[in-house]
Image (spheres, helix red, strand yellow):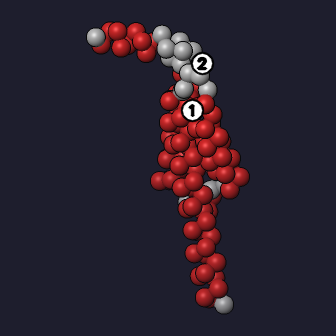
Amino acid sequence: MAFSKFQAFYNHPAGPKTIHFWAPTFKWALNIANVVDISTRPAETVSYPQQAALACSGLIWAKYSTVITPKNWNLFGVSIAMAATASYQLSRKIQHEFINKSTIAKEC
């Protein structure tokens, strides 16, 4: 039974014998980098254009992965994770700038 499931996975049109498996798998590195940045980089160093591009790209590819045949759930998962981590980074940057503006206004 386990062998037949592995064989079905291996021979799937989006399985490990195709680029449809490996491209999203390596795309997880972008999410790992974003998670590491969340814990190590200060919010003021976050780039609006970069994180907005990652968030939009994640949403677009998540939608695309559900309409193609065969459905690519690996691409869907990595794209949702990318949109989530990039959106969180953007929220950190916005909160940081909002807090800085309010403290500067109070000092004046």
Q: Secondary structure at mark 1?
A: helix
At 62% from the left and 48% from the top, the residue drawn is 55
Q: In x, y percent, where is residue 14?
A: 53, 19
In space, the residues marked 1 and 2 are separated at their CA atoms by 17 Å
- Name the N-terminal-most of marks 1 and 2: 2
Residue type, label 1: Thr
Identify the residue under disc 2.
Answer: 19
Along the viewing direction, whichever of 97 and 84 lies nearer the viewer:
84
Q: Residue at x 58, y 68 (%)?
A: 96
Quadrant in the picture for the N terminus: top left
Mark drawn on residue 66? 1
44 up-or-down from 28: above or below? below
The answer to whether 80 appears left or right of 51 in the picture is left
Q: Label 2 sits on what residue type?
A: Ile
Give me the residue at 61% from left, 38% from top: 63
Mark 1 and 2 residues: CB-CB less than 8 Å, in contact? no
Tell me the quadrant of the picture where the C terminus can be found. Answer: bottom right
Q: Which mark is residue 28?
A: none
The residue under the point 61% across, 73% down is 98
**How many neighbours does mark 1 have within 10 angstroms: few (below 14), some (14-19), or many (20 or more)?**
some
5 displayed left or right of 91: left
